[in-house]
Image: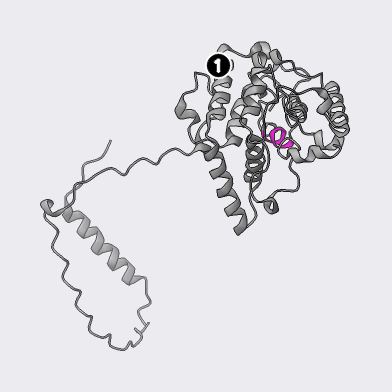
């Protein structure tokens, strides 16, 4: 509770006594030092008259800053809305759909995904993820993320690539931006920009031209089962194989280089193609076996495990 203020006169009396006590603290014999005369102070300019209320602009609150993509959550308990997905990078969309599975113990072969999730105390990778813990909302949200990603116009993806390469010309990119360049190359079906700007460590999925030579096992070390399936079928797609799978039709239908050939037979595969297919199959087998179309689409929604 605030106390009422005392009348002003006792305060003046106390102040006077304080000044007197301070003066008595000095020795009586101490002579005051001589000081040069101070120049006469320049009179301060008179303050400008306060503006009338009518002259002031109307007071308005500053606009609230728009939320950035990085500030928005990567996981939603409720249904995802278009606003939750708008203006997300491919990297952010990848994190969003994989966060759903990381929460139930999914492990990741991609180092950047593994590093991202291991920074959280709640992440506990398991030999087999507990998919039964996924809710219907989790599945519908994952599907919404994938559908949004697939609906991003190619021109938008190419513009993002161009902006990143322009930034790279001025200096090195950050790790997240390097990841984005790789994801863009995968999304476009290969490196479509200036070949001299192509990163040296692109995966064969991001640079299908590598399939002209024999692959090495270490080139597949960071590819998920989803990626391995797509890479194996990329070998067939480059020779014009038509696909019955809707997933594969949609995936390769977005590639400028793909043309389905109704006359395709396995005889069109080269010796290098056949060896690369066998290598990919061996890596798939070592990691639990190749995905079926049902597993790829229904159980995973075409987004499971990166």
Tell me if I can see residue 103 in this picture: no
Q: Eyeballing the image, is 77 above or below 189?
A: above
Foreground pick, 274 / 220: 274
Q: Position of residue 182 (x, y in %)?
A: 67, 41
**Extreme residue toward the front, this view:** 263
Q: Quadrant of residue 120?
A: top right
Tell me if I can see residue 153 in this picture: yes
Q: Position of residue 46 (x, y in %)?
A: 15, 70
Please state if 171 lies on the left or on the right of 201 as rendered: left
Q: Main secondary structure of the magenta part?
A: helix
Number of numbered markers: 1
Q: Which residues are magenta?
A: 111-116
Colour scheme of the picture: one colour
Secondary element at tag 1? helix
Residue at the spot x=70%, y=15% of the render? Answer: 293
Q: Position of residue 113 (x, y in %)?
A: 69, 33
Residue at the spot x=16%, y=50% of the render? Answer: 7
Residue at the spot x=33%, y=42% of the render? Answer: 63
Q: Is residue 114 magenta?
A: yes
Residue receiving disc 1: 140
Please state if 255 lies on the left or on the right of 64 as rendered: right
Q: Quadrant of residue 233?
A: top right
Q: Is residue 297 magenta?
A: no
Q: Position of residue 222 (x, y in %)?
A: 77, 34
Q: Eyeballing the image, is 287 above or below 33?
A: above
Foreground pick, 166 / 11: 166
């Amino acid at each position: 509770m605030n106390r009422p203020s005392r009348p002003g006169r006792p305060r003046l009396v106390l102040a006077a006594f304080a000044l007197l006590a301070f003066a008595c603290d000095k020795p009586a014999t101490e002579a005051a030092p001589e000081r040069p005369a101070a120049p006469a102070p320049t009179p301060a300019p008179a303050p400008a008259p306060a503006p009338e209320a009518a002259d002031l602009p109307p007071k308005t609150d500053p606009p609230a800053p728009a939320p950035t993509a990085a500030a928005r959550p990567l996981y939603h308990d409720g249904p995802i809305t278009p606003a939750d997905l708008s203006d997300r990078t491919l990297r952010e969309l990848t994190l969003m759909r994989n966060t759903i599975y990381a929460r139930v113990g999914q492990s990741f072969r991609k180092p950047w995904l593994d590093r991202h999730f291991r920074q959280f105390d709640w992440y506990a990778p398991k030999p087999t993820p507990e998919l039964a813990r996924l809710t219907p909302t989790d599945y519908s949200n994952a599907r919404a993320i994938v559908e949004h990603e697939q609906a991003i116009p190619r021109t938008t993806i190419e513009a993002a690539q161009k902006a990143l390469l322009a930034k790279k010309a001025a200096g090195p990119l950050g790790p997240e931006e390097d990841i984005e360049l790789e994801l863009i190359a995968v999304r476009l079906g290969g490196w479509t920009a200036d070949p001299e700007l192509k990163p040296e460590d692109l995966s064969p999925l991001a640079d299908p031209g590598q399939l002209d030579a024999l692959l090495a096992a270490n080139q597949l070390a960071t590819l998920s089962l989803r990626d391995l399936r797509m890479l194996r079928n990329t070998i067939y797609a480059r020779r014009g194989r038509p696909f019955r799978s809707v997933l594969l039709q949609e995936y390769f239908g977005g590639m400028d280089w793909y043309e389905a050939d109704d006359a395709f037979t396995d005889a069109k595969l080269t010796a290098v193609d056949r060896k690369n297919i066998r290598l990919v199959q061996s890596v798939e087998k070592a990691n639990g076996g190749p995905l079926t179309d049902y597993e790829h689409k229904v159980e995973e929604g075409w987004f499971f495990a990166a």
